[in-house]
Amino acid sequence: MDVTEISIRDLDAEKFIKVQADKIASVVGDGVAINALSGGVDSSVVTLLAHKALGGRLKTIFIENGLMREGEAEEIVGVFADLGVSVEVVDAKKQFFDALSGVTDPEEKREAITQTFYKDVFGKLVKESGAKHLLQGTILTDVDETVAGIKRQHNVFEQLGIDPNDAFGYNIIEPLVQLRKDGVRKVGQALGLPESIYNRMPFPGPALSARVIGEATSERVELVRKATVIVEEELSNTSAFQYLAILHEDKVTGMRDGARDFGLQIEVRCWDSVDARTATPTELSFKTLSKLAERITGEVPGVVSVTYNIGSKPPSTIEAV
């Protein structure tokens, strides 16, 4: 299935909103639709766009999968309550960590999350709601990377020849699939989302499991969550496109209190980019890097080494796995 791109230069945000809202209303008809809100730019824009189209006939759910940033559910529910959108939080941490148990291959982790989300957790919620349509924030970069075999994005189906209705029992509506990230931000601003949301950094669909190399246990995810808090606090004053922390699988030799401490490695990545198709590492000062290393080794249990990625995309990618 080919997708025609709408570039940021050609995007009339107000017209796009009207066209897509009308399409959503037409497809859903008198029925109800459902969507999962993660708090990222794409899902937030889809939520407000679908709310504009359907009002109370849209059921919005935040899936608490145990893989999100610290305090994410409470923050996002509050933001959307202020926008007049009610969000139900569903605790599914056990289902996701059970599915990830023993899984170390990056693509297998992504597939485990995809199947758990669409079949087990969200599939059940869709059936209970009576909705026949799922709204989701797939964008063109997700499609490109998946079709090219670079990285399987959890939200891409029809472009791979997968019929969601056959696979999961419901149709998927993707109103943002013609846009890149910069276009989605422009639409979010036009919809009235606060800048803290429409200008938010991208966050991977598999969430923090994509930032744990090897098995994503609840304990290892908690470590990268603590490192993420520090990275986001220390780099929030940069103009970078995205910054993140990655927990490596191998341990390295360190020293603490005069004794050997065989511990963990955290890799920091910080990127300059416009639409995520290409990216270059941000030239952070050594003072900033030193502060990051000091805080991460001091505040994240077991970490003895902090590195900074300096490989551009391509050949690197923004996320590690």
Image (tube, rainbow, N blue to C red):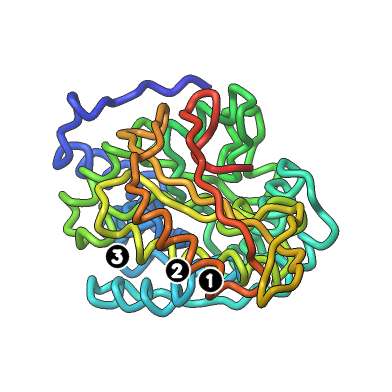
Q: Are marks 1 and 2 in contact (CB under 8 Å)?
A: yes
- Amino acid tagged 1: Lys
Q: Give how far apart the Cα atoms at labels 1 and 2 are.
A: 5 Å
Badge 2 element = helix
Q: Give how far apart the Cα atoms at labels 2 and 3 are.
A: 34 Å
Image x and y of residue 37, in percent: 44, 62
Task: Name the image quarter holding residue 198.
Answer: bottom left
User: In the depicted view, which residue is nearer to us: 28 or 310?
Assistant: 310
Badge 3 element = helix
**Disc number placed over residue 226 in the picture, else none:** 1
User: In the depicted view, which residue is nearer to us: 186 or 292?
Assistant: 292
Location of the C terminus by quadrant is top right
Residue mark closest to the camera, 1 vs 3: 1
Q: Is residue 229 above or below residue 147?
A: below
For label 3, the crowd category at 10 Å Cα-Cα, with few meaning under 14, some 14 to 19 and many 20 or more, is some
Q: Residue at x 28, y 26 (%)?
A: 6
Instruction: Name which of mark 1 and mark 3 comes first in the sequence.
Output: 3
For label 1, the crowd category at 10 Å Cα-Cα, with few meaning under 14, some 14 to 19 and many 20 or more, is some
Q: Is residue 78 above or below residue 235?
A: below
Q: Residue at x 39, y 32 (%)?
A: 280
Q: Are marks 2 and 3 in contact (CB under 8 Å)?
A: no
- Amino acid tagged 2: Val
Q: Residue at x 70, y 65 (%)?
A: 96
Q: Is residue 234 left or right of residue 38?
A: left
Residue underneath mark 3? 55
Q: Is residue 48 left or right of residue 259?
A: left
User: In the depicted view, which residue is nearer to us: 293 or 17?
Assistant: 293
Residue underneath mark 2? 229
Instruction: Name which of mark 2 and mark 3 comes first in the sequence.
Output: 3
